[in-house]
Image (cartoon, helix red, strand yellow):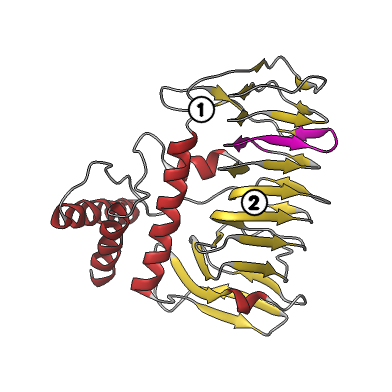
């Protein structure tokens, strides 16, 4: 019960933050639905295999391929539907989208730039209602929530192995989520191969604004989520096989990436982005309307108690 109350307090704190998200856009559904989300621009030199959401402009120095894996359209509540969403304009060498999904563009395509939707999909420009602000609020809200969860609960798991092979492992008790808290300086050894042996969502909260993630994650770890809640610059230069939430960061990827990546902006070179399943998190919708603190605490408590009850009944 103590952990439930602590997590409820976190929910209340997040609800009061400036980034409380609109209930119409659920962050877990977003992260499970997309392979890449950028709140700003995406400069893509290679390929993305899953759905892509770009809040700003899309630039491709060479022909880039999107939705290379079979996926259906994602539909926003009361909004547009597609496998590729671009809130701004498209320039560069062009886009080829596969598997019949629709390409939805809020701005325009520069003259001479070819945008294709193969397999029967459509390409539409000037589309109103792409929910860029709502997606931004959802991701900031989730990142803040996970950070505060780490502050309240501390490290619930243990780090095993040696400096070259580090594994995020479960703690002594069976929890619905595992939490780790680190600083950017803990990821500067380029020889370290990180992994996870947990069976539940495992959050690694990382502080620091300028981060060069020098190590690698060579084996797919779908339960492992890195929350770079302070980062304004994040570089990935070796294989990375986990999920990233970094809503403030300009992210640069120069290697193969397997997982979900949510960033402020993204530059992709010398690698491809492949989806791996994003896990369920014990995170329920928080109302947008401002409430007094006791009301927020009660909402958080009810949501988390409901989650635990559903977990026990399963």
Q: Is residue 53 magenta?
A: yes
Please name whichever residue, 52 or 221, is drawn nearer the observer in this view of the structure: 52
Where, by quadrant of the figure, is residue 70 drawn?
Answer: top right
Which-is-in-front pick, marks 2 and 1?
Answer: 1
238 sits left or right of 25 in the view: right
**Residue depicted at x 73% and y 67%:** 216
Q: Position of residue 178 (x, y in %)?
A: 45, 68
Q: Position of residue 238 (x, y in %)?
A: 77, 63
Crowd band around label 1 with a 10 angstrom C-alpha radius: few (<14), some (14–19), many (20+): many
Crowd band around label 2 with a 10 angstrom C-alpha radius: few (<14), some (14–19), many (20+): many
For the N terminus, the image quarter is: bottom left
Count all numbered tags in the image, as a single digit.
2
- Above or below residue 74? Residue 150 is below
Of the two numbered discs 2 and 1 on the same chain, state the one appearing first in sequence.
1
- Which residue is under mark 1? 130
**Residue depicted at x 20% and y 53%:** 296
Please name whichever residue, 73 or 59, is drawn nearer the observer in this view of the structure: 59
- Which residue is under mark 2? 259
Where does the magenta region start and end?
Answer: 50-65
Alpha carbon of mark 2 to alpha carbon of mark 1: how far? Answer: 24 Å
Disc number placed over residue 77 in the picture, else none: none
- Above or below residue 17? Residue 137 is above
Kindly give the residue lying farthest to the bottom in the view shown.
Answer: 162
**Residue depicted at x 66% and y 55%:** 251
Q: Position of residue 208 (x, y in %)?
A: 55, 71
- Above or below residue 279? Residue 179 is below
**Residue depicted at x 29% and y 52%:** 15
> Does residue 280 appear in this view?
yes
- Assign a secondary structure to mark 1: loop
Q: Position of residue 6 (x, y in %)?
A: 27, 68
131 sits left or right of 289 in the view: right
């Amino acid at each position: 019960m103590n952990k439930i109350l602590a997590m409820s307090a976190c929910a209340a704190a997040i609800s009061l933050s400036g980034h409380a998200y609109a209930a119409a856009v659920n962050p877990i559904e977003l992260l499970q639905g997309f392979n890449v989300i950028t709140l700003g621009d995406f400069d893509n030199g290679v390929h993305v295999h899953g759905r892509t959401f770009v809040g700003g402009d899309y630039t491709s120095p060479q022909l880039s391929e999107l939705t290379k894996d079979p996926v259906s359209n994602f539909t926003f509540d009361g909004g547009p539907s597609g496998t590729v969403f671009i809130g701004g304009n498209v320039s560069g060498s062009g886009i080829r989208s596969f598997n019949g999904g629709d390409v939805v563009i809020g701005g325009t395509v520069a003259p001479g730039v070819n945008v294709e939707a193969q397999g029967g999909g459509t390409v539409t420009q000037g589309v109103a209602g792409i929910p860029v602000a709502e997606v931004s609020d959802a991701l900031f809200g989730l990142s803040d929530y996970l950070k505060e969860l780490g502050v309240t609960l501390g490290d619930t798991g243990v780090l095993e192995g040696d400096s070259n092979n580090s594994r995020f492992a479960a703690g002594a008790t069976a929890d619905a989520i595992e939490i780790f808290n680190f600083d950017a300086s803990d990821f500067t050894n380029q020889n370290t191969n990180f992994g996870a042996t947990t069976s539940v969502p495992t959050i690694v909260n990382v502080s620091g604004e300028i981060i060069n993630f020098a190590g690698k994650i060579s084996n797919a770890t779908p339960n492992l989520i890195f929350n770079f809640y302070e980062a304004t610059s994040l570089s990935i230069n070796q294989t990375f096989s986990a999920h990233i939430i970094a809503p403030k960061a300009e992210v640069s990827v120069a290697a193969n990436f397997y997982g979900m990546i949510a960033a402020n902006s993204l530059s992709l070179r010398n690698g491809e982005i492949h989806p791996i399943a994003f896990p369920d998190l014990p995170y329920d919708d928080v109302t947008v309307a401002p409430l007094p603190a006791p009301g927020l605490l009660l909402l958080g408590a009810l949501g988390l108690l409901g989650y635990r009850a559903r977990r026990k009944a399963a």
